[in-house]
Amino acid sequence: MDGFRTTAMRGASRLAIAAALATGAFGASAAAQEIVVGALMPMTGDLQAYGEFDLNGVLLAAEQINEAGGVLGQELTVIVGDTQTLPQPAIDAAQKLVSVDGAVGIIGALSSGNTIPVAQSVASVSQVPQLSPASTSPVITGLDDDDFLFRTVPSDAYQGVALAGVSLEQGFDSVAVMYVNNDYGEGLAESFGSAFEASGGTIQASVPYEQGRASYRGELQQLASDDPQALVLIGYPENGVTILRQALEEGFFDRFIFTDGMKSPDIIEQIGAEFLNGAFGTAPEALADSEPSAMFTAFYEERFGERPPLPFIDSSYDATMLLALAITAADSTDGAAIRDALRDVANPPGEQIFPGEFAKAVGILAEGGDIDYVGAAGAQDFDENGDVGGTFGHWVIEDGELRTVRVFAP
C-alpha cells in the first residue's frame, strides 16, 4: 500500500473519499484549496494491528477540524503513507508525503525504529514538523532533529520505571527479557532493567530478537536456562505471537509480562485466552476520570463504534489537533513557523482547549488570545526536547479480555 488520500468529512467513508479524489471527482478547485498532512502509519507489517485504529484517531480529528471550517479557511487533507513497520519503507513513504504530496506536517510514525530515521533524513532536512503519537524510545529525547520532532506520548524512560514497579508488586523478582532489536526495544529493555534491578529484582538474561524470523527457539532456550519466573516480552504483535507460541510449545515459559507494543486483542485471539490469563503489562494511558479522555471516547464511539483497548488512538488524535492548531496560530504552512508555534498552543498559559473544541480555539487565536490544548491522551505540555509527561495503565488479560487495573504516574 503506497498510500491513500482523504479529505476528512463527517459521515463519509474515507475509502470512498480516496476513490473520489483519485478519479478527480472533487475537481481541481477543491484540490487547490487544501492543506495536506501526512499520516505515517503501519498499515502492513509487525504493527499492522495498530495502524487502522490509530489512523481512525487522525481521521476523527481531521473531520472535526473540517466541520469547524478547516485550517486557515482550507480543508485539511490526510494522506496516508505505509511504513510497513520497517525503517526504509518508512523513510520512502515520508519522502513521498513531503516531496510529492506536499505534506506540511507528518503524524507518525508509530515505531521508534521508523520515527527516528524519518526525523533525521526527512523531517529535519525538509523542515517539516513531525509528531509521533506512539514512539517512546528514550533516544528521541536527545535526538539531533533541529527541533522538528515532537511526540504526544511519554518516553519509555518512564514506562520502564512503571513496568518495573508493577512487576515487583505482582510478585515477580526474577525475570528474563526479550526485546525487539530496534530503538524502541533497546531503550525500554534498558530502562526496565535498570529500574527493576535498582528495586531489588534480578534480570536473569536479556536478549534481542530480529523481526521477521520463523523461529526464536534458540533465544527462548537461552532465556529460560536460569529458570526465571516470567518472560518480559518487549515487541510487537506479529512476531510476538510467534515468540509466545514457541515459548509455550517448548515449555520455556508460561508466564508473561508485556509492554505497550503487545497490548493487542490479536495476541489473545491467536494464542488463546487460556494460555495468557493473568499476563499483564503497562502502556501509556490517560486518567480514567479525565474529562478530555471521556469526551474523546464519546466522539470516537459515535463515529466508529466501540473504542478498542489499544494504545495510541487518543495520542494520534492529539497529534493531529496540535498540528492544525499550530498552523492556525502561525497563520502559515511554513515548517519552521509551525514548529515554533507548537509549544504555544500546547503549553500553559492560555485557555484550556479540549477535544472537539477546534472552533473555540480558532476564535481565541483570532482575537490574539492564548490557548493550552489539553488532549485526549492527557496534558500535552512539550518540553525543550518535544517530549511530554504522562500516566500509564497497568493492564491485565482476564477471561480473554484486556482490562485496565489502574492508571498511575510512575
Image: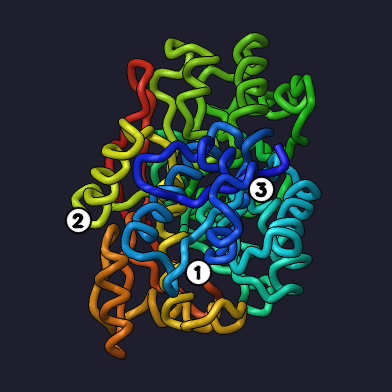
Mark 1 element type: loop
Alpha carbons under labels 3 and 2: distance apart: 32 Å
Q: Nearer the viewer, residue 142 or 68?
A: 68
Sequence-first disc among 3 and 2: 3
The residue to which callout 2 is attached is 291
Alpha carbons under labels 2 and 1: distance apart: 22 Å
Q: Position of residue 99 (x, y in %)?
A: 75, 64
Q: Position of residue 162 (x, y in %)?
A: 42, 51
Q: Is residue 189 shown to the viewer in this render?
A: no
The residue to which callout 1 is attached is 387
Mark 2 element type: helix
Residue at the image position 51 percent from the left and 27 percent from the top: 256
The residue to which callout 3 is attached is 81
Point out the image quarter for the C terminus.
bottom left
Residue at the image position 63 percent from the left and 63 percent from the top: 103
Residue at the image position 64 percent from the left and 18 percent from the top: 247
Amino acid type at circle 1 is Asp
> Vertical placement of 80 versus 218: above or below?
below
Mark 3 element type: strand
